[in-house]
Image (cartoon, rainbow, N blue to C red):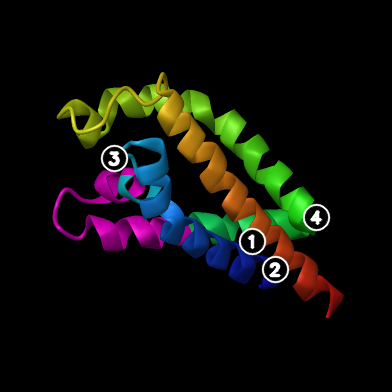
Amino acid sequence: MRGAAAGAAAAVAWSASEPVLRRLTGTTYSNARLLGRFATRGRAWPVAGLALHVANGAAFGVAFERLGLQGVKAGIVAAEVENTLAWPAMAIVDRIHPDRRDGAWPPLVRSPRVAAQEVVGHAIFGAVLGALVGRSTRS
């Protein structure tokens, strides 16, 4: 349960940082929007996107804790490994996501700005996850 709570909290921290990350990278891309617009085309996408992002974070947190990982460094490394392994799937997203199909987003898999945003977002997620799991396992 601790890993799930830590992962959920880390996903919320990442989502909260997205407006700043979008400004810094000059993109309109959002991880929560990526998930939410897959789930629904309606106005509820922000709620769906955040819920899916938090659920994914919780699942990642469970795996992180079960692997015996803890601490900020381990959290960042684990999150960046996941990011690196998942990045090629952006080529599929480019073909099927509604925001790519209607031109609201640039080609994601080839965008250095989106890649930078994902690297920083994953680092934030990993740092928060690692800090919380490290703290909760020492209690």
63, 84: nearer the viewer: 84
Which residue is at a point 60% across and 71% down the rendered structure image?
5
Which element type, helix, strand or loop, lies under badge 4? Answer: loop
Distance, label 2 to label 3, CA atoms, is 29 Å
If you read the primary sequence from the N terminus, does the residue marked by circle 3 or circle 1 appear first? 3
Q: Amino acid at mark 3?
A: Thr
Above or below — where is 107 with respect to 10?
A: above
The picture places residue 129, in percent across and down from the top left corner, at 66, 60
Which residues are the magenta region?
Answer: 34-54
Give the number of the mark in front: 4 or 3.
3
Residue occupying the point 60% across, 30% down: 84
Q: Amino acid at mark 1?
A: Val
Residues packed near mark 1 inside 10 Å, few (<14), some (14 to 19) or many (20 plus): many
- The disc, 4 or 3, on the residue closer to the chain's N-terminal end is 3
Q: Earlier in the sequence, mark 2 or mark 3?
A: 3
Please say whether residue 66 is visible from this viewpoint: yes
Q: Which residue is mark 2?
A: 132
Q: Residue sitting at 29 percent across and 40 percent down?
A: 28
Which residue position is annotated with label 1?
Answer: 128
The residue under the point 43% across, 57% down is 15
Does the magenta-highlighted stretch encompass residue 43? yes
Looking at the image, is 79 positioned above or below residue 101?
Answer: below
Q: Are marks 1 and 2 in contact (CB under 8 Å)?
A: yes
Q: Are marks 3 and 1 in contact (CB under 8 Å)?
A: no
Residue 85, how many percent across, how many down?
60, 30
- Label 2 SS: helix
Q: CA distance from mark 4 to mark 3?
A: 33 Å
Q: Which residue does the numbered mark 3 point to in the structure image?
A: 28
134 displayed left or right of 115: right
Q: Amino acid at mark 4?
A: Leu
The reply to whether residue 62 is visible in this rendering is no
Which residue in the protein does label 4 denote? 69
